[in-house]
Amino acid sequence: MKALVLKQDKELEYLSLPDPRPLSPSELLVSVKYAGICGSDIPRGFQGGAYHYPLVMGHEFAGLVEEAPPGSSYARGDRVTAFPLLPCRSCGPCQTGDYAQCEDYDYLGSRRDGGFAEYVYVPEANLFRVPDHVELRSAAQVAQQTGAALLAVQQQRGVFATAAGVGAQHGFELDALVAEQRAKLEHISGMTSAEAKKFLMDAMEDEAKLDVAKVIKAMEEEAKETSDKKSKNILALAIQRYAGEYVAERSVSVVTLPSDEMKGRIIGREGRNIRALEAATGIDLIIDDTPEAVILSGFNPVRREVAKLSLQKLIADGRIHPGRIEEVVAKAQEEIEQAIKEAGDQAAFDLGVHGIHPEILKLIGRLKYRTSYSQNVYQHSLEVAFLCGIMAAELGINVKQAKRAGLLHDLGKAVDHEIEGSHAVIGADIAKKYGESPKIVHAIMAHHEDEKPATVLAILVQAADALSGARPGARREMMETYVKRLDDLERIATSFDGVLNSFAIQAGREIRVMVSSDLVSDDRALFLARDIAKKIETEMTYPGQIKVNVIRETRATEYAR
């Protein structure tokens, strides 16, 4: 049969599938003629809301009975629609007729394949007859609502049975009557139902937001009482038990010379030596008035290290000419490659994680020469791995797996200047290529929200990454970048209505927002803090996290005369 298949999030494809099979003897095969798209199908198909993949969606449909089991009240060709909720009929709520509260329910088009296909099997108890005067297209549009209404009416009457054909017929007649009354109301009010709906929604929006804010605030306070102490203990323990060294590297390296006379020998006759060295290493040599020093400039940290080592060997040897330069650079490259391999092996050994592909270990070793905000990424990865392991032990989950994910989380930074894309996506692709488990791949992908974290492991990696990057002294910024970040923070905060002033403090890791008490209520302040935080996440790039504090003050002033 043909079906529209949701292969993965945002990927729909019209495919040929095997004919479906019944899951119980009471199910009838329905040939689908019309299927509607419900509002819930949008997040299910395009916002990661599906329970599983692949999935045939569609829970509002109508069609003809194709096959019916012996003893069924339906026959081939009967016009039917279906109620998509499939209760277990055995749990406590089902026994009292509260099918919507079923503890083990199934659902057409959501938990099991639905009506975006030529055929679908439906339990007889979930089928409704469609009267001859009602089009199947219309039946598909009101199937779910009519079924729910009939079940509610039967419960109110004390009848705990599935709606039958006569009920469905009355349901469709009721629907026609409601449509007629709606048309009369539109004529009297001078507004269409859509306009009236929008008017009501606009009028109720503020009230609903306030109610939601109160609920969120109450829930957050309750959660904080029980979670803050435990989470702070875990983080504090992890920080105290691991104190790693930190190396600050830059995009330039300095080679010390025994004397200024050596500068002339490095340059060579008509600059041939310096040109040969730059061509062999791909790094610029800057020879200026700096006494007894040569500056090596380049963005590739590995090449810069090769150039530094080569120049040191040439200075120590004393023989500096193009032929010797090529020979020394080749040897330096071999030494650096060996050092990279040893660094990767040492990291795996120190952490006690084994079975990592040799190519991944080489990339880990390359991180030794890579920096982020002047923080050495190799040391940062080790810190994150140790912190993940400590927190995983406290939570009782797999420690080695947590260390592995922490070590590999910045893997993409070893090659991100060579391949397009964010380092998290690049690292996840490399880990997947070399056989890492889906949990590790997901933790790498999700540590910068390129993918929504769906496991405890992914959240642990996020937390450890933030701890390592946000600790004082770990990372540095240029003064211009730092000042711009503070200005952007204050600009974003003051762009919202009701904000009087804003102040970026704690080196840009916190922003305090002063609001007007006349324009912003206590409940609205909660929403404002969330909106500011979301806008900061969308528009800015920063290490660690930024705390948003919204402060509302009410002053009452009177004078005694």
Image (cartoon, rainbow, N blue to C red):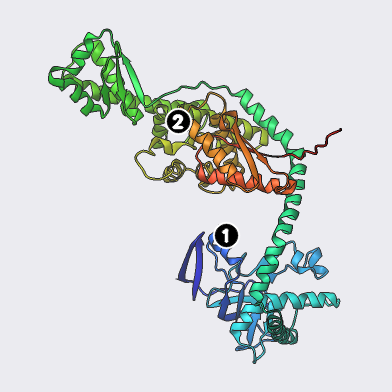
- In the rendered structure, the answer to whether residue 80 lies left or right of residue 364 reads right
Q: Alpha-carbon neighbours of circle 2 within 10 Å: few (<14), some, or many (≥20)?
A: few
What secondary structure is found at the residue carrying circle 1? loop
When the figure is inspected, residue 188 is found, relative to residue 17, above or below; the finding is below
x, y percent for residue 354: 49, 33
- Tell which circle, 1 or 2, labels the residue nearer the N-terminal end: 1
Q: Quadrant of residue 402?
A: top right
x, y percent for residue 481: 46, 32
What secondary structure is found at the residue carrying circle 2? helix
Amino acid type indicated by mark 1: His
Question: Which residue appears farthest toward the left when viewing the image?
Answer: 269
Q: Nearer the viewer, mark 1 or mark 2?
A: 2
Q: Residue, x 69% and y 60% (percent of image)?
A: 205
Q: Which residue is mark 2?
A: 480
When the figure is inspected, residue 244 is found, relative to residue 205, above or below; the finding is above
Q: Which mark is residue 52?
A: 1
Amino acid type indicated by mark 2: Glu
